[in-house]
Structures are given as C-alpha cells and as structure tokens.
Amino acid sequence: MSAAGPQIFPLTGTVTVRDVTRLAEALQGALTASSGLVIDCTGLTEIDLAVVQLLIAARTTASATGKSLTLKTIADGPLSALLRQTGFIAADGRALTPEGDFWTQGKAA
C-alpha cells in the first residue's frame, strides 16, 4: 500500500545509460513508497535514449499497479531535443507516438 501521495522525483545534470540501473532501482523504490511520481526534468543538462526508455517502462509499470508517473512540465531543454531527434515528438511539440501525451502534457501546477 502506498505510504504517501505523488512525490517529486528530480532528474538533474547528466543522466545516461550509465545511470540506468541506479535510476531504475530509485524509481522502483519511490513508486513503492508513494501513490505516484512527478518526474522533474528541469535540471537536466544531458539525457540519452536509455533513460527515455526507462521512463516509458516505469510509466507502464506505475499504471499497471494503479499509480501515476507524470512529468512536472512538458518536455523541455535536452529532453525535448532528444525526443525530437528520436521521433517521439514533432518539431512543433506534437506527440508522434502513442505515449506522446507523457512528453507533451506536464502536470498541472
């Protein structure tokens, strides 16, 4: 049972494939301890596709367990650039994939 409501989960600095195992464990622990996560990517300076894939998997897992995983704000900065480069979102910010709402709709503040 969840101990608390959604909690902020910050991603800051450089987050790449080298961080995926640690990040996956941290996401799992945070989801276990709360009703959901709000991923804050505003402090990112670099991110790679492995982390994007991990966030998609974490969102699927959260949903399957009745929890939420959202972004604090719409994808911006390095995350937005990567999502455009890899075909998740269009140059104008429109979603191009079924899970596109995850990247293009931030949590209401």
Image (cartoon, rainbow, N blue to C red):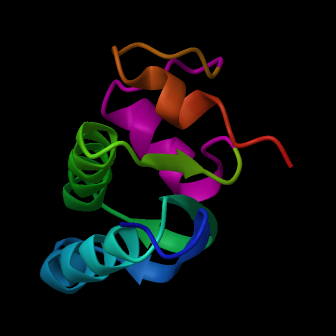
Residue 14 appears at what percent x and percent y?
42, 81
Q: Quadrant of residue 30?
A: bottom left
* Vertical side of 37 occupied by 67: above or below: above
User: Which residue occupies 45% across, 23% down?
Assistant: 100
User: Which residue occupies 56% across, 76% down?
Assistant: 10
Q: Nearer the viewer, residue 59 or 85?
A: 59
Residue 12 appears at what percent x and percent y?
54, 81
The outermost residue toward the right is 109
Q: Quadrant of residue 22?
A: bottom left
User: Which residue occupies 22% across, 47% down?
Assistant: 61
* Vertical side of 45 occupied by 13: above or below: below
* Vertical side of 83 occupied by 46: above or below: below
Q: Nearer the viewer, residue 84 or 107?
A: 107
**In the rendered view, does 58 fall on the left or right side of 75?**
left
**In the rendered view, does 109 fall on the left or right side of 22?**
right
Which stretch appears magenta? 74-92
The N terminus appears in which quarter of the rendering? Answer: bottom left
Residue 15 appears at what percent x and percent y?
36, 76
**86 is within the stretch colored magenta:** yes
